[in-house]
Image (spheres, helix red, strand yellow):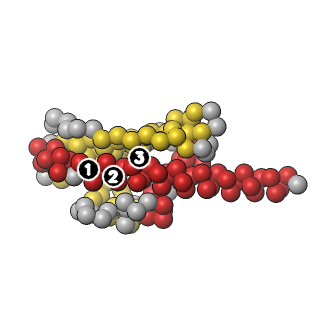
Amino acid sequence: MATGQVERVAITIDAPIDVVWAVFTDVEQWPTWTRSVTSVELIDGPMRLGARARIRQPRLPTVVWTVTAWDPGKSWTWTATGPGARTRASHVLTASGAATIAEQSIIPSGPIGRVLAFMWRSLTRRYLATEAAGLKQRCEEVAAGAKSARSVLAQ
């Protein structure tokens, strides 16, 4: 299947990679920190290779994603398929000193997938940016709370 246009966003988060990983992979909590996701339901257990999640987003059809690659603490990829369409979404974390770079990419393929990707291109870009900003804010809140708790315990 030929691949369509890749949409990608990266953001630097002032939080350790383990914090970002914990927040990012707690997919059922995504609606609490991004407006681009209405609900996420893990269908068959926790996030791991082979896990499936049903995601509802405003202005998009409900989609079931299957985790097809899983590198704990670093990255995961999941895919959603339909007649003539396949979408792969990658989530990659890279430590950068005390911060973390979080990168998300959406890669459509298939004849219908490429057409839908073109039609939803601006929405996809907006959602990726919204998710990145929400992830940054949530992770930095969690990291600040953990740092505050450590300083109280040290007193």
At label 3, counting other C-alpha atoms closer than 10 Å, the crowd grade (few under 14, some 14-19, many 20 or more) is some
Left or right position of 125 against 25: left
SS of the residue under disc 2: helix
Q: What percent of the width, then of the height, locates residue 65?
A: 32, 54
* Foreground disc of the pair 1, 3: 1
* Mark linked to residue 30: none
* Disc 1 residue type (three-letter): Ser
* Foreground disc of the pair 2, 3: 2
Residue at the image point whose x is 27% and y is 59% from the top: 63
Left or right position of 125 against 1: right
Q: What percent of the width, then of the height, locates residue 36?
A: 37, 60
* Disc 2 residue type (three-letter): Arg
SS of the residue under disc 3: loop
Which residue is the site of mark 1? Answer: 122
* Mark linked to residue 126: 2
Image quarter hosting the C terminus: bottom right
Q: Nearer the viewer, residue 51 or 155?
A: 155
From this viewpoint, is residue 113 visible? Answer: no
* Disc 3 residue type (three-letter): Leu
Q: Quadrant of residue 7?
A: top left
Residue at the image point whose x is 42% and y is 53% from the top: 131
Q: Quadrant of residue 96?
A: top right
Q: Disc 2 and disc 3: Cα gap in Å?
A: 28 Å
Q: Is residue 35 above or below residue 23?
A: below
Q: Nearer the viewer, residue 3 or 46?
A: 3
Q: What percent of the width, then of the height, locates residue 147?
A: 72, 51
Residue at the image point whose x is 33% and y is 45% from the top: 89
Q: Disc 1 and disc 3: Cα gap in Å?
A: 30 Å
At label 1, counting other C-alpha atoms closer than 10 Å, the crowd grade (few under 14, some 14-19, many 20 or more) is few
* Mark linked to residue 49: 3
From this viewpoint, is residue 39 visible? Answer: yes
